[in-house]
Image (spheres, grey):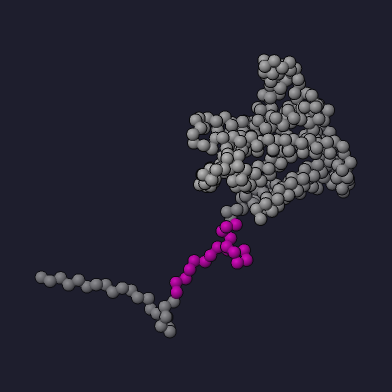
């Protein structure tokens, strides 16, 4: 018995008049802004709302408050235009604080970069035993809370603290109040900052060195270049980007320094460690000068933007 299998014919869509087959319709795209799709904007919308809603709106509100004579509490807001900014230009405490920030920034940025680079170069070789332990020890202070660091060093640098005891143990009769002497208090705070943040410079330099082409150093050593020549002529030029990053972050960090100063000296003794941030805090919290402190905040923001612009342009000029 023979069974005949009949194949079912494939269904063929009728061709439209004219003989050509109509193309299949595509799903409609998402709404567009102009000619651009909307989907990418949805991904950045949360960050955009955060930046615009908190940072830029806050800056705008601070700028508005800076044009007022206001204590920040009651409703007696008296518009005075640029009166607060004129008062800042004539305020000797403001210029003293700017000078302290400049000295603090130069000392901390330069020393941190030098120490971080030296440690990164010393630990770059695989022959160094215990490299992981050294890296942990170097970076550990960076993750410590500034409040804990300030509290600890306030005890260490007291007249009867561990620092003076260490100096006396090596034959130096030291009874110095490191944070209470107006002549050295600023430098003592700078030393604390250097201790805490040198590990950050070390980490960036160590990461940058690990990405360099090691054949350049081997070729220089074969050609008879010494260690200092290799560092000066080959290593340092290739780390220009890291230098610029550390200088930029260090300057901005010096402008923003508050917790370390406030928890160790509070800006004293006698304004010897007054920073812009501590001066702003005292104006708004202790003296109820909300308008004046807002103007100081805007000036601080402008100074930070100027430094950032200068350093970015200098870095690009060096690249060219």
Residue 29 painted magenta: yes
Using the image as rendered, state which of residue 207 and residue 149 is in the foreground. 207
Give the quadrant of the C terminus.
Answer: bottom right
Identify the residue at image location x=71%, y=42%: 252
Residue 52 visible to an observer of this rendering: no
Using the image as rendered, state which of residue 161 and residue 45 is in the foreground. 161
Q: Quadrant of residue 102?
A: top right
Name the dominant secondary structure of the magenta segment.
loop
Please provide percent x and percent y for residue 312. Answer: 69, 50
The magenta segment is: 23-41
Please provide percent x and percent y for residue 84. Answer: 86, 43
Determine whether 318 is above or below 257 in the image.
below
Identify the residue at image location x=76%, y=20%: 176
Give the quadrant of the N terminus.
Answer: bottom left
Residue 83 painted magenta: no
Determine whether 212 is above or below 192 in the image.
below
Q: Is residue 179 left or right of residue 92?
A: left
Q: Is residue 266 left or right of residue 156?
A: right
Using the image as rendered, state which of residue 94 and residue 160 is in the foreground. 160
Determine whether 166 is above or below 200 in the image.
above
Please provide percent x and percent y for residue 317. Answer: 69, 53
Identify the residue at image location x=57%, y=57%: 40
Please provide percent x and percent y for residue 241. Answer: 63, 47
Residue 91 visible to an observer of this rendering: yes
Identify the residue at image location x=79%, y=24%: 181
Q: Is residue 220 left or right of residue 289?
A: left
Q: Residue lying furthest left in this view?
A: 1
């Amino acid at each position: 018995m023979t069974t005949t299998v009949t194949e079912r014919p494939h269904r063929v869509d009728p061709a439209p008049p004219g003989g050509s087959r109509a193309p299949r319709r595509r799903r409609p795209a998402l709404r567009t802004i102009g000619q651009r799709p909307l989907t990418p904007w949805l991904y950045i919308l949360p960050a955009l709302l955060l930046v615009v809603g908190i940072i830029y709106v806050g800056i705008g509100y601070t700028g508005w408050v800076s044009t007022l004579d206001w204590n920040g509490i009651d409703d007696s807001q008296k518009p005075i235009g640029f009166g607060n900014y004129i008062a800042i230009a004539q305020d000797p405490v403001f210029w003293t604080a700017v000078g302290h920030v400049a000295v603090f920034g130069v000392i901390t940025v330069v020393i941190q970069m030098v120490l971080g680079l030296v440690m990164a170069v010393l630990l770059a070789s695989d022959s160094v035993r215990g490299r992981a332990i050294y890296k942990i020890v170097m970076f550990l202070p960076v993750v410590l809370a500034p409040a804990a660091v300030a509290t600890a060093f306030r005890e260490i640098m007291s007249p009867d603290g561990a620092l003076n005891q260490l100096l006396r143990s090596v034959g130096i009769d030291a009874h110095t109040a490191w944070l209470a002497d107006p002549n050295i208090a600023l430098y003592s705070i700078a030393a604390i900052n250097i201790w805490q943040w040198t590990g950050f410079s070390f980490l960036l330099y160590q990461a940058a060195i690990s990405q360099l082409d090691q054949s350049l150093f081997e070729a220089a050593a074969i050609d008879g270049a010494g260690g200092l020549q290799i560092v000066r002529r080959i290593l340092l030029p290739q780390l220009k980007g890291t230098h610029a990053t550390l200088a930029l972050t260090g300057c901005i960090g010096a402008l923003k320094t508050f917790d370390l100063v406030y928890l160790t000296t509070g800006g004293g003794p006698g304004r010897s460690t007054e920073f812009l941030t501590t001066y702003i805090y005292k104006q708004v919290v202790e003296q109820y000068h909300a308008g004046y402190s807002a103007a100081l905040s805007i000036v601080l923001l402008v100074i930070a933007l100027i430094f950032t612009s200068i350093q970015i342009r200098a870095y690009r000029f060096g690249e060219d």
